Amino acid sequence: MSRARAALAACVLVSCGPSDWRNADVHVDVSGVTWSDTDAVRLCLGGVGVHEEALATGRVAFTGVPVGADGTLLIDLLDPDDDSLRTGRAGPLSLDADTPWQPADWSDCDGADCAACTSQGERAAAGDDSWLVAVRFL
């Protein structure tokens, strides 16, 4: 066996690649959506604010969420031609420390109301305890 094949086999056996889904206070797994790495995702958490980034590997983290936040989480994929519109949504979901993992089903925008989510609020101050909310697109 060549060195390259041996290295590949070793990587497969020890699971080289992205690390397992962990180290977040709240996890959300979104299913039923077709996405691309260039899609922009917007997370809106009531009372906390908005986090927006390219979807890339299908994982997004919302940092600085005040511990015990009980806002409603909306997860939108933004229209590539107009970021005030969404192509679909998961949620609303309620954050709860007693439910650290939640599944979320995807709904494509049907054209009736496709406005992207918005939210006002404040993130935890630097140095304060905070939650990490992690969203994974399956």
Image: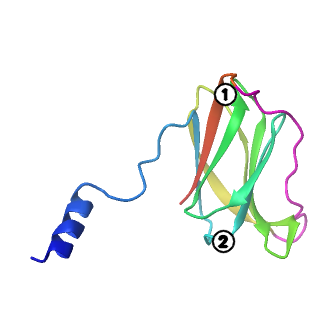
Q: Position of residue 27 (x, y in %)?
A: 57, 41
x 60%, y 44%: residue: 134
Amino acid carrying label 1: it is Ser
Which residue, given by chain and number where applicable, does mark 1 sit on? 130
> Horizontal placement of 83 versus 18: left or right?
right
SS category of the residue bearing label 2: loop
Q: Quadrant of the N terminus?
A: bottom left
Q: Amino acid at mark 2?
A: Thr
Span of residues in magenta: 110-126
Residue sticking out furthest to the left: 1
Q: Report the magenta stretch's main SS.
A: loop
**Earlier sequence position, callout 1 versus callout 2:** 2
Q: Is residue 113 magenta?
A: yes
Crowding near the residue tagged with mark 1, few <14, some 14–19, many ≥20 C-alpha atoms within 10 Å: some
Cβ atoms at labels 1 and 2 below 8 Å apart: no
- Numbered mark located on residue 1 in the image: none
Q: Which label belongs to residue 38?
A: 2
Please report the residue visible at 78 percent of the width from the left and 39 percent of the height from the top.
Answer: 72
Give the CA separation, mark 1 to mark 2: 28 Å
